[in-house]
Image: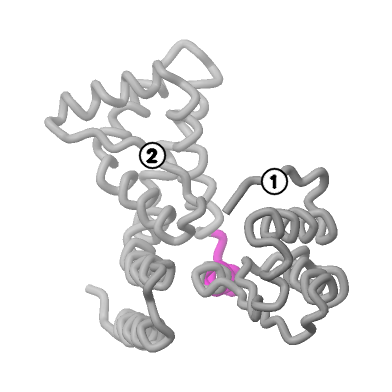
Amino acid sequence: MGIKNVPKADGENIAKAITSCLTDRFGDDWKTKVVAMGTDGASVMLGQKSGVVQRIREYTDRPFIYAIHCSAHRLELAYRDGLKALQTTTPQKCDALLLNLYLFYKYSPLNRANLQAAFASLGMKMKVPTRVGGTRWLAHTKRAIDHVLFGLPAISLHLEQVRQSHRKDSAAKGKNFLKLLKDRNVTFWLYSQMDIVSALAQVSEAIQQKNISLGDVWNELESVKCILTKYKTRRFC
């Protein structure tokens, strides 16, 4: 549609940028046709008094414009709220571990090269740790967990080498990362979350498709509810 500079990320300036972009493209005709707006759940977008949607309603004199909170974002928030409700700090430890491993290899060409050598020595295809979050939300989380679990032998091998390094800062990081990766609670959580996030990510990716219908979204949600219920009730050896 277009790109506009936003001097400040508040409701007023974002609304001005959107209306200016639409007016440049369609003239004033769009104001008589808009019926809904889809956004994430940020208060700056959905705020009742000064959110972007409310300002668009006032600007177009169409108070009935419907605000649609992105379903993929709602799913992400529900997942995060579920983690917060747990009586354990393991999820926070795992998130911090995944983020720190990503940064550890992203900003050090030497670490990436040595990790690649570790993968090669084990005859494995290299998968570098990736970001936990991102624009694809749960799909990014799934990929981050998958890369760490797949590359666990090579990552552990490299961190063992780093732990014995003469550089104190790198050695300390290697030691801490390795301690967490060898923690049974951490590895169990990562494997269990891989099952859960894989199911949720499939729903998230489906409802982000441009041609999906409300019926399709309903079917995806009902399907994942059945899968998660089975996970909840099944026995673990």
Q: Nearer the viewer, mark 2 or mark 1?
A: 1
Q: Which residues are magenta?
A: 78-89
**Residue 50, horizontal then vertical, whole percent:** 86, 69
Q: Which mark is residue 178?
A: none
Three-letter amino acid code of the residue under disc 1: Lys
Specify few, some or many for label 1: CA neighbours under 10 Å numbering under 14, 14-19, or 20 or more: few
Pointer 1 residue: 4
The N terminus appears in which quarter of the rendering?
Answer: bottom right
Pointer 2 residue: 129
Q: Quadrant of residue 195?
A: bottom left
Residue occupying the point 71% across, 81% down: 65
Q: From what the image shows, is residue 1 above or below residue 88?
A: above
The C terminus appears in which quarter of the rendering?
Answer: bottom left
The answer to whether residue 229 of the structure is visible from this angle is: no
Residue occupying the point 37% across, 52% down: 145
**Residue 96, horizontal then vertical, whole percent:** 54, 47
Q: From what the image shows, is residue 224 above or below residue 93?
A: below
The answer to whether residue 235 of the structure is visible from this angle is: yes
Marks 2/1: CA distance?
Answer: 34 Å
Q: From what the image shows, is residue 63 above or below residue 121?
A: below
Indicate yes or no whether the magenta region holds residue 88: yes
Q: Nearer the viewer, residue 156 or 66?
A: 66
Q: Nearer the viewer, residue 27 or 90?
A: 27
Element assignment for label 1: loop
Q: Quadrant of residue 160?
A: top left
Residue occupying the point 70% across, 61% down: 27
Q: Is residue 200 left or right of residue 4?
A: left
Q: Quadrant of residue 70?
A: bottom right
Indicate yes or no whether the magenta region holds residue 75: no
Three-letter amino acid code of the residue under disc 2: Pro
**Residue 212, horizontal then vertical, whole percent:** 38, 76
